[in-house]
Amino acid sequence: QSVLTQPPSASGSPGQRVTISCSGSSSNIGSNFVYWYQQLPGAAPKLLIYRNDQRPSGVPDRFSGSKSGSAASLAISGLRSEDEADYFCSAWDDSLSGGVFGGGTKLTVL
Amino acid sequence: QVQLVESGGGVVQPGRSLRLSCIASGFTFSSYGMHWVRQAPGKGLEWVALLSFDESKTYYADSVKGRFTISRDIPKNTLTLHMNTLGPEDSAVYYCAKVALPAVKAPSLCGMDVWGQGTTVIVS
């Protein structure tokens, strides 16, 4: 059971917009920054979004992050086949004094 | 470019110890905190440990506290994870990851940017 809650799966057709949610609590998302990672099959995770809504250089602007209260979301617009991957949210948890991840969302491009 | 290369994984019997290494290059190693994160086969990511950039603070997941130790050797640009009393539940791919921002102590600012390719630990 992960501290942060994500839907196990999401899907969309090429060109569509998909949103992945990440729900936490006041001790993690509610009081700390949220990070999003993309993990392609067989590869290491890659940073997509940092500090809730910032994109590292090289990440397409099709990817965007937002946060409201104790929940965050990742939106992917103009869906492409290469976006098919697992997506994980993460934050620091002040009560646990440790990092926490969501269980991951497997995105399928139909 | 920034690169992290893990090594030291393998098959180990329950109750034994193992030491993982992560060699860093392409950035000033002493200026960044570092994490270890693991992923059991077919499962999600589990945060394991964080070492602050100045080595003044270490943080551990409850599942490894008292058994694992994170440390680094700056001249060798090497991050280490000493793992003791291993159990089957510790079987996973272990990744080292660099903190995105330099010289930050607040753990909430210690999100990861670059990850290594991982090293596999099997406890059996």
Image (cartoon, helix red, strand yellow):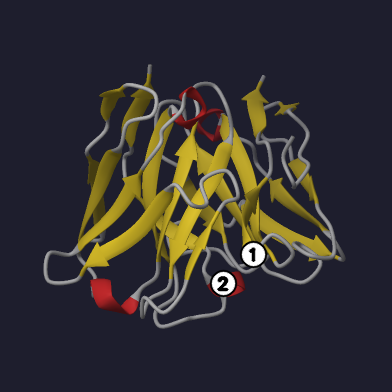
Rounded to the nearest whole Å, what is the CA distance between mark 2 and mark 1?
A: 8 Å
Instruction: Judge depth for marks 2 and 1 and give the one in front.
Output: 1
Image side of residue B2 versus residue A82, left or right: left
Q: Chain of mark 1?
A: A
Residue A97 got which mark?
Answer: 1
User: In which image quadrant can residue B33 be found?
Assistant: bottom left
Amino acid residing under circle 1:
Ser
In which quadrant of the rendered image does the N terminus of chain B lie?
Answer: bottom left
Identify which residue, B14 or A64, lies in the foreground: B14
Give the residue at the far left of this rendering.
B75
Image side of residue A1 versus residue A68, left or right: left
- Across and down, in percent, residue B11 comes to 28, 22
Identify which residue, B14 or A7, lies in the foreground: B14
Identify which residue, A18 or A52, lies in the foreground: A52
Q: Which residue is mark 2?
A: B107
- Across and down, in percent, residue A58 comes to 43, 58
Q: Secondary structure at mark 1?
A: loop
- Looking at the rendered structure, whether the residues under marks 2 and 1 are on a common chain is answered as no
Say few, some or many: other residues with alpha carbon within 10 Å of mark 1 (under 14 / 14 to 19 / 20 or more): some
Residue B10 got which mark?
Answer: none
Asked if disc 2 and disc 1 are in contact, CB closer than 8 Å, the reply is yes
